[in-house]
Image (cartoon, coloured by chain):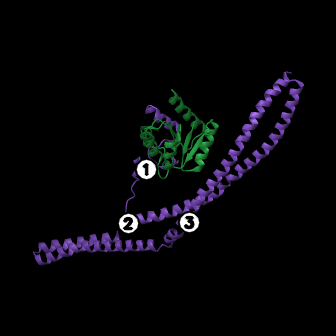
Amino acid sequence: MKILIVDDFSTMRRIIKNLLRDLGFTNTQEADDGTTALPMLQSGNYDFLVSDWNMPGMTGIDLLRAVRADAKLAGLPVLMVTAESKREQIIEAAQAGVNGYVVKPFTAGTLEEKINKIFERVAG
Amino acid sequence: MQEQIEIESIRLEKARALVAHLEAGESEDADRVIGELAEVGESGLFQEVGRLTRELHEAINGFLLDSRVSEMTQVDIPDAKERLNYVITMTEQSADRTLTAVEQSMPMVDELEKQAGKLLAEWDKFRSRLLTKDDFRGLSDELAAFLQQTQRHSKSLHDNLSNVLMAQDFQDLTGQIIRRVIELVHDVEEKLVKLVRITGGKLEVRKDLDDPTVLEGPVVPGVEQGDVVTNQDDVDDLLSSLGF
């Protein structure tokens, strides 16, 4: 299971990386915004994408749309982990095809629950 | 008020004179009084406009000459930016130190747990008299090694926990810095309110709250941020209402 973590703050990338490792996902890579992440996704055979929303350069929602528009990546499960909490935005992300939405600040339990839910659905 | 009463009494006096002239058939005098009557109110109005203009002029000059305003613009606000940048640096360093300590500690704890589990299984066998003499000798060596390892790891864990403890020292400093910036924002707010009052403008409510393209960032208690969810349960409810 190869996972890409996209967030402009290195601290948050590190926290997510450690939480994922605790959940048994040790193969993780990091990117600091959508512009860096997209080429990595296109050439890297990733199985899962965890992305922030608000980032300089390309935002998470634009990255999500780019992923869904790319024939090779369209089926990639995407979990949004973000501080953005407006109802319109959550709906927007849902319409853009996000697989899960976690608002910051979050707990390890929430992250685990959402990830498990996504994989259950992908497998089932 | 005094001025108004005076104007009224002058008007009344003129009106009585007007009636008297009209009754006496003195039309020239009556015209003159009508002219005077019109002037009574006008001169008061002109005086009032003049007074307001002077006050406005003084207020604007007072605002522009307020040394606190130029001091805030040239010194305090650039300072505040530096201070807030320093807060970002300090909190980032703290998070970094804490994460490093945690990342170093977790593998040690995992190792101890694994090793303890293994030894516990052996120990149970020993207590059930299932171990041979040679097995026991092996277990004894392993136990000694484990105790040494526990001692070493405990020392490292203690150091790491001390690092986590010390990494919290930013709170006091950032708290003080942020409090000073809040005071400055309060000062600026007061000056701006004064300026808005001078220019007679009306404060309009923020319009972009409902604009979904504007990113609000973290939810802050006490700040109006539009239609936001307050926790993960709200997000889950919203998504499940959309069929997730």
* Residue at 86% from the left image edge and 34% from the top image edge: B141
Label 1 secondary element:
loop
Up-down relation of residue B94 to residue B240 (above or below)? below
The residue labelled by disc 2 is: B199
Q: Earlier in the sequence, mark 1 or mark 2?
A: 2
Binning the other alpha carbons within 10 Å of mark 1 as few (below 14), some (14 to 19) or many (20 upward) gives few
Label 3 secondary element:
helix
The residue labelled by disc 3 is: B79
Chain A drawing hue? green
Asked whether the viewer can see residue B231, the reply is no
Q: Which mark is residue B214?
A: 1
Asked whether the viewer can see residue B49, the reply is yes
- Chain of the residue where label 3 is placed in the rendered structure: B
* Residue at 84% from the left image edge and 37% from the top image edge: B145
Q: Which mark is residue B165?
A: none
Alpha carbons under labels 2 and 3: distance apart: 29 Å
